[in-house]
Amino acid sequence: MKEFENIDEILDFAINEEQQAVDFYMTLAESAKNEYIKNTFIDFAKEEVNHKNRLMDIKQNGLFTMTAETVADLKISDYTVSVHPTPNMTYSDALVLAMKKEKAAFKLYSKLAERAPNSELKDVFLSLAAEESKHKLRFEIEYDEFVLKEN
């Protein structure tokens, strides 16, 4: 597993993860048959765009001091979800996949916060972790209300 060489590589990785989340939610929105569900996934995509923009702003404006320190292996594969959305995915399956992705994002940002080179960047990653945790909770509530109550 590749180790990050500097904070730019960490931010690039996180920016890429946010873009993947945007793409994921937009794919789910495009396949949604229900307008409410479609709008829910679009709203999540917008939130992920905000996360991406926040990270890009940090990278571009240098809100942290650069260090030559090598960041330890984060075992990124432990925090990714290999399942991909399919056109015939049920709403229940989409919610489960979304919960798993949000949990993986939470773990990733928590680990990045542990390894942040300064308190300012640590706070950013902790804030992003909290946002991802909130997303997961919203999907859990949705799952409870629309899947578990039906069964």
Image (cartoon, rainbow, N blue to C red):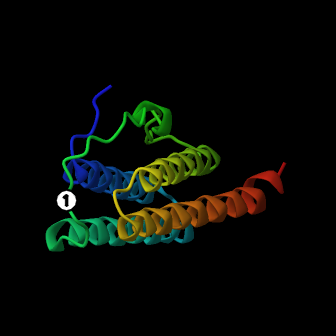
Q: Residue furthest top?
A: 1
Q: Which residue is mark 1?
A: 66
Front in this rendered view, residue 146 or 118: 118
Front in this rendered view, residue 125 or 23: 125
Q: Residue at x 59, y 61 (%)?
A: 133
Q: Residue at x 51, y 60 (%)?
A: 129
Q: Position of residue 3 (x, y in %)?
A: 29, 33
132 left or right of 2?
right
Q: Is residue 82 visible?
A: yes
Q: Answer with the quarter of the image where residue 5 lies.
A: top left
61 left or right of 113?
left
Q: Residue at x 49, y 57 (%)?
A: 32
Q: Residue furthest left?
A: 60
Front in this rendered view, residue 23 or 87: 23
Q: Position of residue 120 (x, y in %)?
A: 37, 71
Q: Is residue 41 visible?
A: no
Q: Residue at x 41, y 67 (%)?
A: 119
At label 1, the amino acid type is Met
Name the quadrant of the N terminus: top left
Q: Position of residue 27 (x, y in %)?
A: 38, 52
Q: Position of residue 33 (x, y in %)?
A: 51, 59
Front in this rendered view, residue 81 or 75: 75
107 left or right of 31?
right
Q: In terms of secondary structure, where does tag 1 sit?
A: loop
Q: Is residue 123 positioned above or below 88 on the image?
A: below
